[in-house]
Image: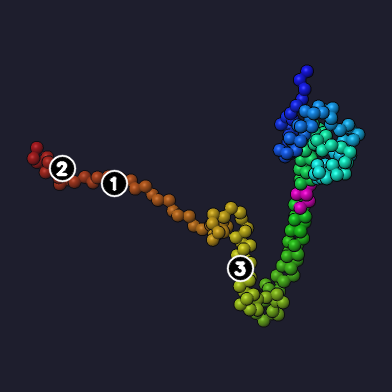
Amino acid sequence: MVLKRCLNEDERFGLTQQEIEIAEKFLRKNKTAGALKQLEAVKVYELYMVGCSFAEIQAQFPQHDMGAIILTAAMQEWAADRERMHSTLRDRVKAKVVKSVIEQTDFLTAMLSVASAEHMKQMRDYILDPNAPKPSLRITSIKDYKEITETLAKIVQGATPNAKDNKMSPMFDALAPKEPKKLIEQPKEQELDLDALLRQEEDD
């Protein structure tokens, strides 16, 4: 029976080179039997999974040798467990962030729709009849005009993705007239020179 003297690749996952050396030195001296027993390992495992370092764990459990703690974590592949847990947590956080962004976007879009419906009728009435009451929401200065036009440009430019450059919106690019296809010039047929034919016949 070959005695285990080194950690394999799976057991080394998540460990620093120094931690690997400590675990393997302890392993060669105490063999696999030197690892923590199951009941002892459970409490240590809980601290490891919440992100405690081996030094912090050893400070909490001074009765355990540092090598025994690291060897136990390596042989039971705790680092892989923690990575899977963190990945799951990241996915949950991302899902919550995306859901929150969608809800906020819907809310703000609804507010804009309400504001548009509220003021649109006043604006249309005034456009049709300048004697009608002026809309409460309107441009009253050059600054307002500049802000409105810049905002409108940003909205239109962002209406469709994958712009070819930063200056032209793909929406306008799609509406721009395309260059007409160039017609391939066909070779002109040579016109018959009747006078030349008659002279040729006379010579013959």
Figure quadrant of residue 65: top right
Q: Is residue 94 magenta?
A: yes
Residue 5 x/y as whole percent: 75, 26
Q: Amino acid at mark 1?
A: Lys
Q: Which residue is labeled 1 in the image?
A: 188
Q: Earlier in the sequence, mark 2 or mark 1?
A: 1
Q: Residue at x 71, y 31 (%)?
A: 9
Q: Amino acid at mark 3?
A: Glu
The residue furthest right is 39
Question: Which image quadrant: the N terminus?
Answer: top right
Colour theme: rainbow
Q: Amino acid at mark 2?
A: Leu
Q: Residue at x 67, y 75 (%)?
A: 138
Q: Which residue is labeled 3 in the image?
A: 150
Residue 147 x/y as whole percent: 63, 71
The residue furthest left is 203
Total count of labels: 3
Q: Is residue 85 magenta?
A: no
Local crowd size for mark 1, using a 10 Å CA cut-off: few (<14), some (14–19), many (≥20): few
